[in-house]
Image (tube, helix red, strand yellow):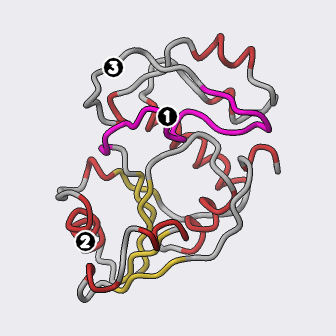
Amino acid sequence: MKIGINQPYLFPYKGYFDLIKAVDKFVIYDDAKYMKGSWINRNYFPDLFTFRLKKHSDYAKINECYFYDIEEDKKHFPIKSKYVDLLSQTDNIALNCTKTLRAICDDLKINTPFYFSSDIPHGKFVEGIIDIVRALHGDTYMNLPNGKKLYNQDMFGDIKLEFIETNPGVSILCEL
């Protein structure tokens, strides 16, 4: 069984959805530390746009971060989309990303079930990935091409490591 794990992103590029489609179970890594300047709450639409977040601890996890004023940001968002309408002030950024990911997957006919890493006991880095893959009864961890810079098969022991091939690009919202 193939397992994919990735941080949640708002309206990621097509390759993210290729990964979701390629695996049997997809884990939203919602309890990772939020990294300022990451792609979790920003992307190119086709120009860089950032959904503002409320001030939070430098050590906050993604599922502890919330939009600052999503209704105002929606007014200035350059693309009108039903997916943008799903964003809410009351849900954390991980839940917001997951709502939009699920809706886009549904429209793309991708039925892969989602799980939250925060619901699965796990360690950190590679050990955490292995914990999650095993907890979901997986035998293969599948990652995006950039993971080749981070991971090699020796790190995963009896868990098979695979990478999908994708073409980086702008957000899938620009393609839908």
> Disc 2 residue type?
Ile
Q: Which residue is mark 2?
A: 130
> Which residue lies at the image location 31% right of the left edge and 52% below the top edge?
117
- In this rendering, position of residue 93 left or right of residue 167: left
Residue 131 lies in what quarter of the image?
bottom left
Q: Is residue 156 above or below residue 101?
A: below
Residue 124 place in picture, x, y as percent: 21, 57
Q: Main secondary structure of the magenta part?
A: loop
What element does badge 1 sit on?
loop
- In this rendering, position of residue 63 left or right of residue 112: left
How far apart marks 3 and 2 lie (CA) works out to 29 Å
Are the residues flagged by discs 2 and 1 in contact, CB closer than 8 Å? no
How far apart marks 1 and 3 lie (CA) works out to 14 Å
Q: Earlier in the sequence, mark 2 or mark 1?
A: 1
How far apart marks 2 and 1 lie (CA) works out to 27 Å
As drawn, the label of residue 56 is 3
Are the residues flagged by discs 3 and 2 in contact, CB closer than 8 Å? no
Residue 38 place in picture, x, y as percent: 49, 40
Residue 78 place in picture, x, y as percent: 80, 26
Which of labels 2 and 1 is toward the front? Answer: 1
Q: Is residue 71 above or below residue 61?
A: above
Q: Earlier in the sequence, mark 1 or mark 3?
A: 1
> Disc 1 residue type?
Gly
As drawn, the label of residue 37 is 1
